[in-house]
Amino acid sequence: MVISAGLKDCGTESRVDGDWLVYSNQLVLTNAEVPSSKGSLIVRWASTVIPIECHYKRKQTVSGEPLTPTWLPMTSTISVFGLLHFSLRTMADGCPSPRSSSVYQQGEAVFLEASVEAPLHPPLTLYVDSCVATLKPDPLSLPSYKFITKHGCLMDSVLPGSSSKFLPRKQDNRLCFSFQAFHLNKETVEQMFISCHIRATLKQKSHSHLDKACFFNRPTFSWRATEGDDALCGCCASEDCSTGHTTQLNTEEKHEADTAVGPLHTLLRSHWTGHLSVNH
């Protein structure tokens, strides 16, 4: 028996995994019920689900003159190619590699990396618009703690003794930041979910009051930008960073997504003395 289906048929999904373009789907085999001579049903085999993946290399060696691509608007690219992939993951200290454990001591630095993979698009710069910590996967649940707000202001860095910050970029499509593990209640072990709204803009259009990565630098007692002009971070100390500033980019130039990671498990440490402002 041969089953043939196109890469975009039958609800097949695509994703980028390192140097590979992966198409995935499932082959569902339902059980066969045959009536017996006595009128009962005989089940010949159980229902089975077989995962199917097709892997293609993203980079190929070709001969001949190079081609000049004609870029489609990203709204079209998403629907046609499905290759715009946003992600959020926990990282080891300093963000050199993914972290294997999800357990933290209260007050320990938690490193997160937000990224976007867009191989069929002009270079993008990624920003973290906002982040909230909750006890449940729902980012709107209570209690909650919004530690990044105002289009890229790391508000947790303002707290006394905080070491929270955005790290210098190594790649434009990735942004790493840290905050200190905390509790939203007094449980000995608490699980927490981090939900972030992240955004990518064309590289040449980046750096504005809406496209920034800012943290409070305690030695200088001022807001600092990870890159670009520190003056872009001045609005972090005000009520709003969107009013009266740069106009929104065209939909072809701005792409965004909601991402999440968790659960993270925080162990209570009795001598930790930090304070949080929590919404109930």
Image (cartoon, rainbow, N blue to C red):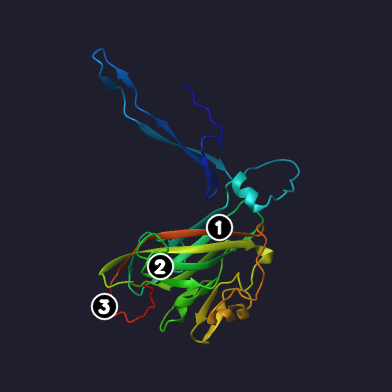
Q: Where does the image place residue 65, in percent across and percent down from the top left?
A: 76, 44
In terms of sequence position, does the residue under pointer 2 or pointer 3 come before the other? 2
* Residue 167 visible at all: yes
In terms of sequence position, does the residue under pointer 2 or pointer 1 come before the other? 1
* Residue 96 visible at all: no
Q: CA distance from mark 2 to mark 1?
A: 21 Å
Q: Secondary structure at mark 2?
A: strand
Q: Where does the image place residue 56, in percent across and percent down from the top left?
A: 56, 41
Of the residues shown, which amino acid type is indicated by label 2? Ala
- Reading the image, the residue beneath label 3 is 270
Q: Secondary structure at mark 3?
A: loop
Q: Vertically, is 191 above or below 21?
A: below
In this picture, residue 71 sits left or right of residue 187: right
Disc 2 versus disc 1: nearer the observer? 2
Check contact, mark 2 vs mark 3: CB within 8 A. no
Q: Residues within 10 Å of mark 2 (few under 14, many from 20)?
A: many
Quarter of the image that includes the C terminus: bottom left
Of the residues shown, which amino acid type is indicated by label 1? Val
- Reading the image, the residue beneath label 2 is 133
Instruction: Kindly indicate the quadrant of the structure image that contains residue 80.
Output: top right
Instruction: Kindly indicate the quadrant of the structure image that contains residue 34.
Output: top left
In terms of sequence position, does the residue under pointer 1 or pointer 3 come before the other? 1
Picture residue at 49% right of the left edge, 40% below the top = 24
Say which mark, if any, is on residue 149: none
Q: Where does the image place residue 26, in percent across and percent down from the top left?
A: 44, 36
Of the residues shown, which amino acid type is indicated by label 3? Ser
Q: Residues within 10 Å of mark 3 (few under 14, many from 20)?
A: few
Among all residues in the image, which is located at the extreme top?
37
- Reading the image, the residue beneath label 1 is 116
